[in-house]
Image (tube, grey):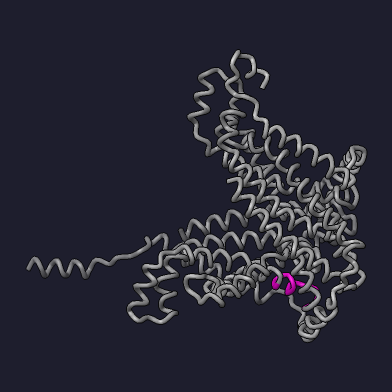
């Protein structure tokens, strides 16, 4: 009889992977997702007339790019490439310099004031949310077209990313060495340099290298809105409908991105 | 540092490699600034322009016709982001599986990896330019460009997640005589899904940001509204748009964080 009851008990007990609340929330999410997809599909404006000749246009695009106009490289593209690399590097250096104080202010274990924390966090989110291209539009209007606008755009946009990860690295620092320094009577600057810096340094270098990699990609297109570098050459080629020159710039960007990826991977392996 | 140098025996001797590195960095900054023609006078002049620029931006323009333009552009951007994310996810599933070296044959894996690297190496903006040429101006070019970007990111991370999973379960399922599809459904999906959903949430977030961008080159959405406003020197409307973009990106970040929490 007891065995019977046990068997029945087993049958009655239903095992479920998720709680009722989780299942309701997930079903609601699926529903919202489906509604959003259907809404997007139904209302997005697509002009069918443009689609009829899309295959021809695509073939035409590549046909016009070939043969690539190699002669344009020494004339314009080489200087633009150098400008792009300097824009990315200088922008990253400037970004790190600007982000460091903001990150210090945003780290909750270092800066006690909640108000300062929140202000710093707002700066980090706001600079990150506005894309580098939009910053470039802004700085082109302020300092005129050219590499300066591009560098400032790269620098300001990178503050958010660099500062966020830097402040997280500071918050993860072990309190032991810092308490030891404080107990020995070290002044704040010494605590910063000898307590936090050695702990944060690997993360700091990794963040800077990673950001440089991203910034090379970004600075290659900033010129489309007047930020100097390869984008400017691409924009010139496209406005003149010289697709063979555009093809050259695209190829150069591709090579630069691949080389940057290899260099950053090598640097990461060497430093960390 | 001067404070620390006071005791007879310096407990922290000067770090010469670091100092030389810093000096080299400073030298590079000066050199690069010269190459890029960055001068102090230009910077100071720029500050004046910047002041005038900001004074023309404030207060932001909230008039009804401008808000209608904003609403239209914003909705299109959101649609672009949603469609690009969904189609990007669907396409990156087979690509990611094909690129995983522990599941697919080596030639296929390498071919797929090269394709994914190609997708990733071009900025969405450049891809958008090419699509504007092939399918014309408008939202479709933006959607297609962001699909390529999504595939590059999601397929790469999916392949990495699949390569890191435990092969024991796949072998167990395979030992029962299951087909490849059953192995994927029973052994791969349960291990990889939570992480993949996290990547997808991040990609939605990222597509929302980038959908504000593709419009700059004719890919539709709020970017084209923004670019037009810039070209018409409509700077007070520019500020409205930028504020709206910041708001929508923050909402997107909250939604994607909430989505990640729901499926962890």
Q: Residue A255 location in percent, x, y?
A: 74, 64
Q: Residue A33 location in percent, x, y?
A: 56, 68
- Report the side of A216 relative to A175 (left or right): right
Q: How many labels does the image show?
A: 0
The answer to whether residue B94 is seen in the rendering is no
Residue B85 is a magenta residue: no
Which residue does the image show at 81% across and 48% down from the upper left? A151
- Report the side of A187 relative to A72 (left or right): left
Which one is in front, B141 or A114? B141
Q: Residue A115 location in percent, x, y?
A: 62, 33
- Dividing the picture into quadrants, the one containing residue B222 is bottom right
Which one is in front, B92 or B109? B109
Residue B140 is a magenta residue: yes
Which residue does the image show at 90% across and 43% down from the upper left? B49
- Dividing the picture into quadrants, the one containing residue A69 is bottom right
In the displayed structure, A123 sits above or below B190; it is: above
Q: Residue A12 location in percent, x, y?
A: 22, 68
In the displayed structure, A256 sits above or below A243; it is: above
**Which stretch appears magenta?**
B135-144
Which residue does the image show at 55% across and 67% down from the upper left? A32
Identify the image quadrant of the N terminus of chain A. bottom left
The rendered magenta stretch, by its main secondary structure, is classed as: helix
Which one is in front, B128 or A82? A82
The answer to whether residue A193 is seen in the rendering is yes
- Dividing the picture into quadrants, the one containing residue A71 is bottom right
């Amino acid at each position: 009889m007891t065995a019977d009851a046990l068997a029945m008990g087993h049958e009655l007990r239903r095992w479920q992977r998720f709680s009722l609340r989780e299942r309701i929330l997930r079903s609601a999410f699926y529903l919202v997702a489906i509604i959003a997809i259907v809404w997007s599909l139904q209302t997005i404006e697509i002009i069918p007339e443009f689609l009829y000749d899309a295959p021809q246009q695509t073939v035409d695009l590549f046909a016009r790019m070939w043969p690539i106009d190699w002669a344009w490289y020494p004339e314009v593209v080489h200087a633009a490439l150098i400008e792009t690399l300097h824009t990315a590097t200088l922008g990253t250096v400037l970004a790190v310099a600007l982000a460091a104080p903001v990150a210090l202010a945003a780290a909750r274990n270092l800066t006690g004031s909640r108000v300062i924390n929140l202000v710093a966090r707002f700066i980090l989110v706001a600079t990150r949310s506005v894309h580098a291209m939009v910053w470039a539009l802004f700085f082109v209007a302020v300092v005129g077209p050219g590499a300066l606008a591009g560098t400032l755009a790269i620098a300001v946009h990178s503050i958010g990313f660099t500062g966020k990860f830097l402040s997280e690295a500071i918050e993860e620092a072990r309190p032991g060495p810092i308490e030891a320094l404080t107990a020995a009577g070290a002044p704040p600057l010494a605590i910063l340099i000898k307590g936090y810096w050695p702990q944060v340094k690997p993360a700091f270098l990794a963040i800077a290298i990673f950001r440089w990699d991203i910034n090379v990609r970004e600075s290659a297109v900033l010129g489309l809105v007047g930020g100097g570098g390869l984008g400017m050459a691409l924009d010139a080629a496209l406005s003149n409908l010289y697709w063979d020159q555009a093809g050259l710039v695209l190829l150069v960007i591709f090579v630069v991105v691949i080389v940057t990826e290899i260099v950053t991977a090598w640097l990461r392996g060497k430093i960390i | 540092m001067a404070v620390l140098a006071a005791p007879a025996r310096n407990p922290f001797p000067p770090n010469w490699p670091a100092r030389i590195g810093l000096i080299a960095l400073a030298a590079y900054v000066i050199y690069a600034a010269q190459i890029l023609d960055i001068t102090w006078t230009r910077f100071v002049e720029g500050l004046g322009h910047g002041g005038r620029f900001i004074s023309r931006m404030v207060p932001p323009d909230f008039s009804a016709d401008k808000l209608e333009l904003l609403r239209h552009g914003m909705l299109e951007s959101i649609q672009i982001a949603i469609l690009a994310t969904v189609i990007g996810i669907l396409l990156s599933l087979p690509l990611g599986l094909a690129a995983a070296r522990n599941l697919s044959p080596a030639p296929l894996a390498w071919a797929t990896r090269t394709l994914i690297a190609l997708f990733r190496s071009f900025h969405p903006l450049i891809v958008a330019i090419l699509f504007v040429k092939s399918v014309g101006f408008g939202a479709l070019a933006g959607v297609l460009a962001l699909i390529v970007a999504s595939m590059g990111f999601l397929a790469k991370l999916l392949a990495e997640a699949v390569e890191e999973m435990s092969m024991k379960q796949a072998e167990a399922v395979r030992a029962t005589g299951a087909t490849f599809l059953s192995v994927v459904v029973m052994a791969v999906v349960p291990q990889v899904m939570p992480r993949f959903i996290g990547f997808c949430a991040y990609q939605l977030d990222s597509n929302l940001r980038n959908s504000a961008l593709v419009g700059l080159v004719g890919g539709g959405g709020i970017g084209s509204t923004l670019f037009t406003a810039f070209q018409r020197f409509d700077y007070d409307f520019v500020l409205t748009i930028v504020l709206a973009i910041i708001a929508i990106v923050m909402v997107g970040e909250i939604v994607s964080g909430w989505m990640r929490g729901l499926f962890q």
